[in-house]
Amino acid sequence: ESGQWQRVEVQGKGPCARRRQCCCVLGDKILLFGGTSPSQDQDLQDEFYLMDHSDLYILDFSPSLKTLCKLAVLHYNLDQSCLPHDIRWELSAMTTNSNISRPLLSSHG
């Protein structure tokens, strides 16, 4: 706890560039939720579109063996049919996009 920023090397897919997100520290994890970013359909008129995100990213500085195994199952696209139901549900929750994210019409000015 030196009060100084440090760059950390992470693996996996991170969130897209955004603002207005909510971040909090929970133990050895940093949780990032939501935020907004420019929509891919942005045009150069008086109005522009923002994408409202409802996704959750977790940066885990001390992942458990269970978490590492779930990540390996996803990374190597391993067969999940023999896994316990609760583990399959967790894998689904880790990879299923919500349908809450939507473009927001915002006035520029």
Image: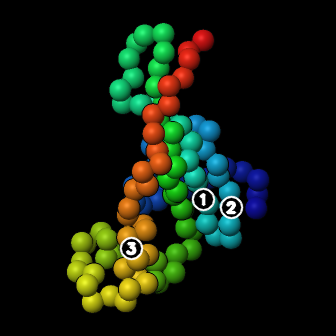
Image: 2 above or below 80? above
Tell me the residue that label 3 is attached to: 91
Residue drawn at (41%, 31%) of the image: 39
Identify the residue position indicated by label 1 in the image: 31
Image quadrant in which the C terminus is located: top right
Amino acid carrying label 3: it is: Leu
The answer to whether residue 11 is seen in the rendering is yes
User: At which x and y percent is residue 54?
Assistant: 52, 49
- Dot 1 amino acid type: Leu
Residue 45 quadrant:
top left
Q: Does residue 43 appear to the left or right of 2 in the view shown?
A: left
N-terminal of the two: label 2 or label 1? 2
Contact, mark 2 vs mark 1 (Cβ under 8 Å): yes
Tell me the element at label 3. helix
Q: Position of residue 104 (x, y in %)?
A: 50, 31
Could you tell me how far apart the alpha carbons at marks 3 and 1 are, in whole angstroms?
Answer: 18 Å
The crowd level at tag 3 (other Cα within 10 Å; few <14, some 14-19, many 20+) is: some
User: Considering depth in this image, is 31 or 109 the residue closer to the camera?
Assistant: 109
The secondary structure type at the circle numbered 2 is strand
Visible in this render: residue 69? no
Using the image, determine if residue 10 lies above or below residue 50. below
Q: Is residue 42 above or below residue 16?
A: above
Q: Which mark is residue 25?
A: 2
Q: Quadrant of residue 20?
A: top right
Determine the residue positioned at 56% across, 74% down.
Answer: 62
Please state which of residues 6 and 51 is positioned toward the viewer in this rendering: 51
Mark 2, Cα crowd under 10 Å, few <14 / some 14-19 / many 20+, is few
